[in-house]
Image: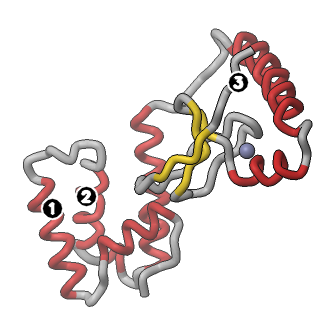
Amino acid sequence: MDPIIFKMIDTNFFTRRPCVLCGGWTEKDQVLCECEGEHVCERCIIKASADKGYVDRALEERAASMERSAISFRSAIGRVKLPSHAEWLKRDDEYSDAWFNANIPGFSDGELASYHSSYYSCRYGEEHPLMPEWQKLIEAEASRRGIDLLALIAAQKSGDALPF
Ligand SMILES: [Zn+2]
């Protein structure tokens, strides 16, 4: 049997990747353990370093898990009901508005709220002709209030700590 050799690959694209062994995710590592587009996370490398049987057991567990998933997926055919995109956007806006209201006193009183709505309503349409104009309005209003609003929006979206 041909060996399947994972190599250490340097990267400057820091993102999490699915781990083929445990089904978890890598960290945002600068060195990837990679083979033909598949990755192995550091936790699995630690386990494999300490236990020679780990890799084959993990592969068998993953294969069994995927077989169970295949049965589950097929049993769902014809039964899945999703919210509409409009419902999803409405709920996302409600969440976002609640977050801004909780974090910026008086947010809902001013025009900033409508700028914010405009900004979010075109989040998937960055080529919208008014987008640069809206962004300028948002930045001007944020500047007037002494708030780094774009950093705030980025923090909200990423779940990072607030930038103030
Ligand atoms: Zn792993």
Look at the image and tell me in which quarter the C terminus lies. bottom left
Of the two numbered discs 1 and 3 in the rendering, the one whose residue sits closer to the viewer:
3
Q: Amino acid at mark 2?
A: Tyr
**Quadrant position of residue 163:** bottom left
Look at the image and tell me in which quarter the N terminus lies. top right
Q: Is residue 24 left or right of residue 116?
A: right
| Secondary structure of the residue carrying numbered label 3 | loop
Tell me the CA gap for discs 1 and 3: 55 Å
The residue under the point 22% across, 72% down is 111
Q: Amino acid at mark 3?
A: Pro
Residue 3's tag is 3
> Quick check: 65 above or below 146?
above
| Secondary structure of the residue carrying numbered label 1 | helix
- Give the percent coordinates (x, y) of residue 117: 29, 58
Of the two numbered discs 3 and 2 in the rendering, the one whose residue sits closer to the viewer:
3
Residue marked by disc 1: 134
Q: Amino acid at mark 1?
A: Trp
Residue marked by disc 2: 119
Q: Is residue 110 left or right of residue 154?
A: left
- Give the percent coordinates (x, y) of residue 153: 37, 67
- Give the percent coordinates (x, y) of residue 134: 15, 62
> Quick check: 78 above or below 125?
above
Out of 156 and 14, give the one closest to the viewer.
14
